[in-house]
Amino acid sequence: MYKKDFDKLAQYPHFLLFYGNEFYLQEYEKIIQEKFKNANILKMYYDEYDFEIAKTHLNETSLFGGESVLIIKHNKIPPNIDKLKKYTKNSYLFFFYYGNKRPEVFGKNFVRFFEPNLRDKVELINKIANEKKVNITQEAKLFLAKSIEPSFLRSEIEKLSLYSDNIDVDVVKELVFIYKEESFEDLIVSILRGEDFFEKLNTMLEIVDFKRIIPATIRYVRDLYSYNLYIKKTGLSSLEGFLGYKLPFDIEKQRVDLAVRLKEKDYYELLKHLLNFELQMRNSEKNKEAIFWEAMSYLKTFKSF
């Protein structure tokens, strides 16, 4: 089933697989934990998985008479996980799968998450804004939805709620724009221009988790390619019609310049290599930091114009 189908369920199946978009995997694990907060919950993450312990837990009765709940998180299919289904008559098993292959377990009992689209992000913003009792204008919501990674929306709206109960797009740009755009953009622009970026990179790594940089670069390159197609189709050199809001002049000029100067083969090569590095960092047994520096070495040799 899809997210919208799961959201309509009055009762959850006793065993269920979740896979797909990582943001939703994290969000729905929180939802499961909240729903079963009074149950006997055991979490097994990655190498913590043990079939015998899992089986024993599912067979247990909560001390308070409630259900036993087992949450498994892994980027591979744990051994014998399918055999745990038969122990869920009076308990629940939720498997959050972070791998990239379609997992062949639990039959039709699965929820597949796709990357949140603009409407999904706006709905999430509405939900968080309601929780925080803050009023955000529609223009500001669109700006947030198009500018902020979903995993950071909650923290950003919490920050905005401390500033005012009524948030418009000017407030968002003042408090959020630099965090989102300039934190990564300055580095990524240097990379794409073929400049020596290692000093900027090392400075950034003092405050930013290295695992965020490759996904941020992928998103930026994808955005540039979208701008490239939009500019070719419309002949316009402004991105306001595409984004729905106006960027500061220098930022817009920089993005338009990069978007049109990168060639089709550049987009293809960059995304092919970066997506491969991201996949390795998720699934490989190799040291993730070593893979990261391998990716940075590739980008150091990248030349387009």
Image (spheres, rainbow, N blue to C red):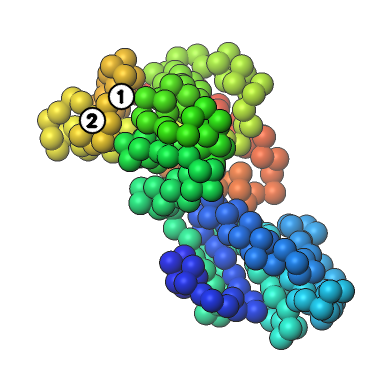
- What distance separates the C-alpha of mark 2 from that of mark 1? 7 Å
**Residue at x 64%, y 49% (from the top left corner):** 284
**Residue at x 45%, y 36% (from the top left corner):** 148
Where's the C terminus, which quadrant? top left
Front in this rendered view, residue 135 or 88:
135
| Residue 72 drawn above or below residue 117 | below
Label 1 belongs to which residue?
247
Q: Which of marks 2 and 1 is nearer the N terminus?
A: 2
Residue at the extreme left of the image, as rendered:
235
Q: Is mark 2 on a helix, strand or loop?
A: helix
Q: Quadrant of residue 235?
A: top left
Q: Are marks 2 and 1 in contact (CB under 8 Å)?
A: yes
| Residue 304 drawn above or below residue 50 | above
What's the residue type where badge 2 is placed? Glu
Q: Is mark 1 on a helix, strand or loop?
A: loop
Q: In this view, does 141 lie to the left or right of 97?
A: left
Label 2 belongs to which residue?
240
Q: Residues within 10 Å of mark 1 (few under 14, many from 20)?
A: some
Residue 290: give x, y in percent of width and height: 66, 34
Residue 151: give x, y in percent of width and height: 54, 43
